[in-house]
Amino acid sequence: MLWVGTSWKMNGTLDFARDYATRLAAALADGAPAGVQPFVIPPATALATVRECLGPGTPVLLGVQNAHWEDAGAWTGEISVPQAAEAGATMIEIGHSERREFFAETDETVNLKVRSTLRHGLRPVLCVGESAEVFEASGSVDHVLGQVAAALDGVADPSPVVIAYEPIWAIGEHGREAHPADIAPVFAALADTWGGRVTAIVYGGSVNSGNILAILRVPGVEGLFVGRAAWTVEGYLRVLELASAAVPTRS
Ligand code: PGA
């Protein structure tokens, strides 16, 4: 099964969310494309709307882009894992590079969030990835394995976790597309250490309809985590279809 999701980051009004989710529901009325598990991570404010528009029985899983590790309390501006679950999330994105860089997320807080998510029976989408400097110094494998080990420290059963390897240099409008050879060593190392022990190990960073097939051919890649290319519902549906088409070509 390929796990293929998108985070909208801080984009989208409720009108946008309604339109996107209604059209996604219609397109997936007969189920998800073969071999693909879709997931959508809208802004938390749009989660209930997206859930409602997708309707009961949808194959699309929903998540939030961050959650605090405490269940409740004096943490202004935060939402907790149980609150996210109540709004319809079954997945919690944790440790995206934008949160690590701009919101002071550390390996320690990432670990606390992973543990809270698992404690409540939700699925962490654990984001890891190295900077351009680390990549150029050939440090990617050590860096990423270290981030995953720190995030999963003390976790007895990591099986619900989706690991998203997203090299920072490949993310967003200033990112450059990764070549399969750039990411293959990291996937080989992740598969070696975590393959079969987690739900999926997926790739993110400038994924688009032109590079999906090449990325999915990299051994160890078990899905995609997509930003810009899935910020229209047509774009996301195209990503899902391309991923599904790639399933039979994978060993
Ligand atoms: P991008 O974002 O696909 O727009 O590069 C990826 C991500 O941040 O997960």
Image (cartoon, rainbow, N blue to C red):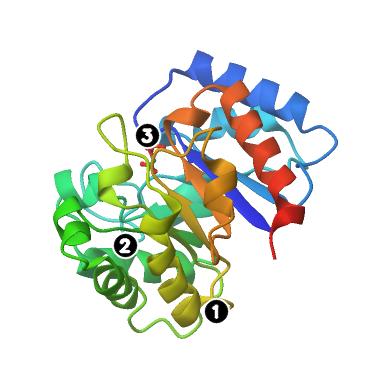
Tell me how far mark 2 sits from mark 3, CA to CA.
20 Å
Tell me how far mark 2 sits from mark 1, CA to CA.
23 Å
Q: Which quadrant contains ligand 1?
A: top left
Along the viewing direction, whichever of 153 and 87 lies nearer the viewer: 153
Q: Which mark is residue 9?
A: 3
- Residue at 52 percent across and 50 percent down: it is 215
Q: Which mark is residue 69?
A: 2
Asked whether the residues under the numbered discs 3 and 1 touch, taking CB atoms below 8 Å apart as contact, a structural biologist would say no
Mark 3 CB in 8 Å range of ligand 1? yes
Report whether residue 89 is seen. Answer: no
Q: Secondary structure at mark 1?
A: loop
Q: Secondary structure at mark 3?
A: loop
Residue 134, position as x, y percentages in the image: 17, 61
Q: Which image quadrant is residue 139 in?
A: bottom left
Q: Is residue 103 above or below residue 141?
A: above
Q: Is residue 215 above or below residue 138?
A: above
Of labels 3 and 1, the one closer to you: 1
Report whether residue 248 is seen. Answer: yes
Sequence-first tag of 2 and 3: 3
Residue 12, position as x, y percentages in the image: 43, 21
- Residue at 34 percent across and 63 percent down: it is 113
Q: Is residue 99 above or below residue 56?
A: below
- On-image quarter of the N terminus: bottom right
Image side of residue 152 versus residue 237, left or right: left
Q: What's under tag 1, amino acid-wise?
A: Arg
Residue 92, position as x, y percentages in the image: 45, 54
Tell me the residue that label 1 is attached to. 197
Tell me how far mark 3 sits from mark 1, CA to CA.
28 Å
Sequence-first tag of 2 and 1: 2
Residue 165, position as x, y percentages in the image: 39, 58
Q: Which image quadrant is residue 149 in?
A: bottom left
